[in-house]
Image (cartoon, rainbow, N blue to C red):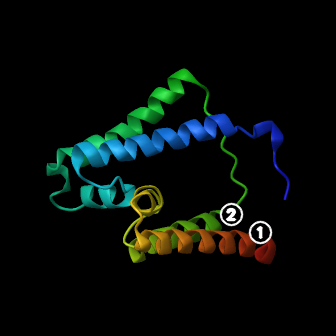
Amino acid sequence: MMIDWVNFTPARSLAGGAMIGLSAALFMLLNGRIAGVSGILGGLLSVDGWREGWRVSFVAGLLVAATLFMLVAPLPPIVIRSSTWTLVVGGLLVGFGTRAASGCTSGHGVCGLSRGSIRSLAATSTFMVAGFATVWIVRHGWGA
């Protein structure tokens, strides 16, 4: 394994992680809810989801933040080296895993682990091992 030293940005990564942690803590403190994106989005897509203004605000905040970032700094180029088939199967597997684990990496990995949840530790460990195995199989087994 080689580290890409040109694009290695530990200070920015630390700052970004701290902002994610702070926002998750503030969301819990002010709203009393876990900042799990899949649960928030899934609830928004339900029949009565649009009536819950906090869900709409949360998702709108994600979109507005990305838009504001584009005004301040150029976005990095998007380079996709996988086939469409690989992306579709990967997306379906992520959706299935999120449903099976009753949450995503933001809910379990950020919020659950910080609360000391054993269930979140199991879910996050499973996410990581499955991700490592999938990348290894796709890159070395299929050569995609």
- Name, please, the residue furthest toward the right: 2
> Which amino acid, mark 2?
Ser
* Residue topped by disc 2: 83
| Residue at 46% from the left image edge and 55% from the top image edge | 110
Q: Nearer the viewer, residue 127 or 137?
A: 127
Q: Nearer the viewer, residue 134 or 9?
A: 9
* Residue topped by disc 1: 139
Find the distance from the CA under tag 1 to the CA under tag 2.
12 Å
Residue 136 to residue 24: above or below: below
Residue 126 to residue 21: above or below: below
Q: Position of residue 88 (x, y in %)?
A: 56, 67
Dot 2 surroundings within 10 Å: few (below 14), some, or many (20 or more)? few
SS category of the residue bearing label 2: loop
Q: Position of residue 98 (x, y in %)?
A: 43, 69
| Residue at 81% from the left image edge and 45% from the top image edge | 4
SS category of the residue bearing label 1: helix
In the image, taking residue 92 as reference, residue 116 lies left or right, namely: left
Q: Quadrant of the C terminus?
A: bottom right
Residue 27 to residue 41: above or below: above
* Label whose residue precedes the other's in the sequence (1 or 2): 2
Residue 56 seen by the camera: no
Dot 1 surroundings within 10 Å: few (below 14), some, or many (20 or more)? few
Residue 60 seen by the camera: yes
